[in-house]
Image (cartoon, rainbow, N blue to C red):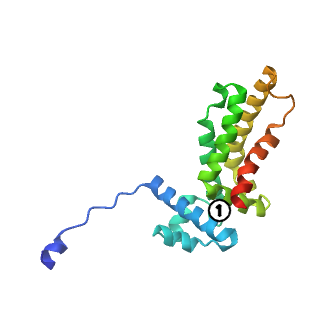
């Protein structure tokens, strides 16, 4: 093909996919934060990992000045969606609780970046998560589901009365988190 013929061919327009771009940016941000920590992570590095620019990153993650919040929100959304798929309310309490514990351990093992993000946030004393308005609602769903399983189990005599769902959920989560982060 001659130079003239090549110049006559116009490339096909690039198809934009906002959700795919956002997912790629969040994945790159997760890698950046888990490799470099909150203070070492750089938006420029996230941009380089995604072959985009800082402005586009801020556009897609909608958290100018604090991309870590968007990363946290996405990480919590993913685990809560996976927990909802367990359908704990449809199972006998003992089986539901065992499934929740096994799922939590497996999820953390398969997604070590989640454990690292939680550890980073814990070092920050929850400052970012407190500003992430969606996480509170997300976490309420698993605490409510756990509480319902506990109450059904107490009614059936397989669990004792008065187990705190928040404390139990924190304990269940702490076991795999400690194993992965340490």
The residue nearer to you, when weighing 130 against 76, is 76
Q: Look at 86% across and 28% down and name the residue there.
A: 161
Give the quarter of the image for residue 42.
Answer: bottom right
Q: Look at 67% across and 46% down and name the residue there.
A: 105
**Residue 137 at least partly seen:** yes
The residue nearer to you, when weighing 163 against 133, is 163
Is residue 69 left or right of 14 when viewed as pictured? right
CA neighbours of label 1 inside 10 A, class few (<14), some (14 to 19), many (20+): many
Relative image position of residue 115 (x, y in whole percent): 68, 56
Is residue 76 left or right of 50 when viewed as pictured? right
- Screen quadrant of the N terminus: bottom left
Q: Secondary structure at mark 1?
A: helix
Relative image position of residue 106 (x, y in whole percent): 63, 46
Q: Look at 50% across and 72% down and name the residue there.
A: 48
**Residue 124 at least partly seen:** no
* 94 up-or-down from 138: above or below: above
- The residue under label 1 is 68
């Amino acid at each position: 093909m001659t130079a003239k013929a090549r110049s006559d061919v116009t490339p096909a327009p690039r198809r934009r996919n906002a959700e795919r771009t956002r997912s790629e940016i969040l994945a790159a941000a997760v890698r950046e934060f888990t490799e470099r920590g909150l203070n070492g992570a750089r938006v420029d590095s996230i941009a380089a990992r995604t072959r985009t620019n800082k402005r586009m990153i801020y556009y897609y993650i909608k958290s100018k000045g604090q991309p870590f919040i968007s990363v946290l929100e996405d990480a919590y959304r993913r685990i809560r969606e996976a927990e909802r798929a367990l359908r704990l309310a449809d199972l006998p309490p003992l089986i539901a609780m065992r499934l929740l514990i096994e799922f939590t351990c497996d999820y953390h093992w398969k997604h070590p970046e989640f454990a690292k993000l939680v550890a980073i946030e814990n070092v920050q004393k929850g400052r970012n998560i407190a500003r992430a308005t969606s996480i509170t609602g997300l976490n309420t769903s698993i605490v409510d589901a756990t509480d319902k399983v506990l109450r059904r189990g107490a009614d059936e005599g397989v669990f004792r009365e008065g187990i705190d769902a928040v404390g139990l959920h924190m304990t269940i989560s702490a076991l795999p988190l400690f194993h992965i982060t340490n």
